[in-house]
Amino acid sequence: SQYNGVYRSTNNGSNWTQTPLNNEFVKCISNDSSLFLAGVLDNGVYYSGSNGAYWTHTFLGNKTVYSVAIKGYVFFAGAGDSGVYKSTDMGYLWVKTSLNTGRITALMFSGNNLIAGTGNGDIFISSNFGSTWTEKSEGLPQSNDTINCLLDANNYIFAGTSSNSVYRRP
């Protein structure tokens, strides 16, 4: 199969050009200011400090990364081998956080809170950059729906699941 990587627009989407990250199956992308992360199939994480114009491969290895989040210069990656990894040195060294439950399929920041959704349908939150986690799955069905995406909007956290449902909580 063909991997098309990441495309970039500098005119609000009127035109798109392919970036040098053109040979990977990109599963997810996130940014904080001009710094971007891209999680890829079987090859870890790439980052760009040039608004996506150029990309550098990090040292997370051959893991499939389903979700990424970034806050300042701290990188987070939700890997397919059941964990959230953290890097504080631009991806040179990755350390597994204490969240070891299920495949991490969604990551996002809401303020300084890092929120993780799993392939088992659970949601966890960390207020200390991944050092400790608290489960916040109340109100979600016990059906093991994958949390596909998370969104922070209008003082709610929204979770989209694999059963075509959307849940929200303040």
Image (tube, grey):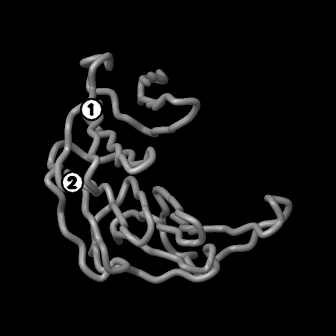
Q: Which numbered tag is attached to residue 136? A: none
Image point 55% across, 77% down: which residue? 21
User: Compared with residue 1, is residue 158 higher up or lower down, i.e. above or below?
Assistant: above
What residue sits 41% from the left and 30% below the top?
162
* Neighbours of disc 1 within 10 Å: few (<14), some (14-19), many (20+): many
Label 1, on which residue? Answer: 122
**Amino acid bearing label 1:** Asp
Residue 53 picture location, percent across and down: 64, 79
Location of residue 168 (image quadrant) = top left
- The residue beneath circle 2 is 83
Judged from the image, the secondary structure of the residue bearing numbered disc 1 is loop
Taking depth in this image into account, of 26 and 50 the one nearest to the observer is 50
| Amino acid at dot 2 | Gly
Q: Residue at x 66, y 68 (%)?
A: 7
**Is 9 situated above or below 163?**
below
77 left or right of 10 in image: left
In this picture, residue 66 sits left or right of residue 50? left
Say if 148 sits above or below 8 in the image. Answer: above
Secondary structure found at label 2? strand
Residue at 27% x, 75% y: name it: 61
Residue 41 in percent (x, y) is at 39, 63
Percent position of residue 30, x then y? 51, 59
**Quarter of image, res 120:** top left
